[in-house]
Image (cartoon, rainbow, N blue to C red):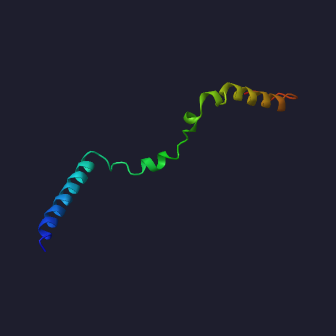
Amino acid sequence: MEILLILVPLTLIIVAVGAILFSWAVKNGQYDDLEGPAHRILYDDDRDMIPEDVRPDDKSQAAKREAGDDATHSSEEEPKS
């Protein structure tokens, strides 16, 4: 029973420290944006993770698309408005 004289005050101190830390977190905005990180995972940021020496060149991709469009419409031109 004598151990309760040590454990009860120790438990109260731990609970008080937890309450202080929780109030500090709330005051500093730790719980302001709960859904932002969940949506941020869906953003496409793979481009930054691809090494530069193996990245596809955007200009060459655009040229290929233009060449492909020209090849399909080479027999007749559409009027531009």
Q: Position of residue 43 (x, y in %)?
A: 52, 43
Quadrant, the N terminus = bottom left
Give whichever of 76, 19 is nearer the camera.
19
The residue positioned 11% from the left and 68% from the top of the image is 5
Left or right of 22 on screen, residue 3: left
Look at the picture and state if 4 lies above or below 52.
Answer: below
Determine the residue located farthest toward the bottom in the rendered image: 1
* Residue 16 quadrant: bottom left
Q: Position of residue 57 (x, y in %)?
A: 66, 27
Q: Nearer the viewer, residue 69 or 52?
A: 52
Image position of 19 with respect to 74: above or below: below
Q: Relative to residue 15, is residue 74 depicted above or below?
A: above
Residue situated furthest front in the rendering: 2
**Where residue 20 appears, x then y in whole percent?**
20, 53
Q: Nearer the viewer, residue 76 or 1?
A: 1
Tell me residue 37's x, y (percent): 43, 47
Quadrant of the snapshot with the C terminus: top right
Counting every numbered tag in the picture gives 0
Identify the residue shown where x is 30% and y is 46%.
Answer: 29
| Residue occupying image coordinates x 85% and y 28% | 74
Give the left or right position of residue 36, taking residue 50 as reference.
left
In the shown orientation, is residue 17 left or right of residue 61?
left
Is 5 on the left or on the right of 14, as rendered? left
Q: Is residue 44 above or below residue 71?
A: below
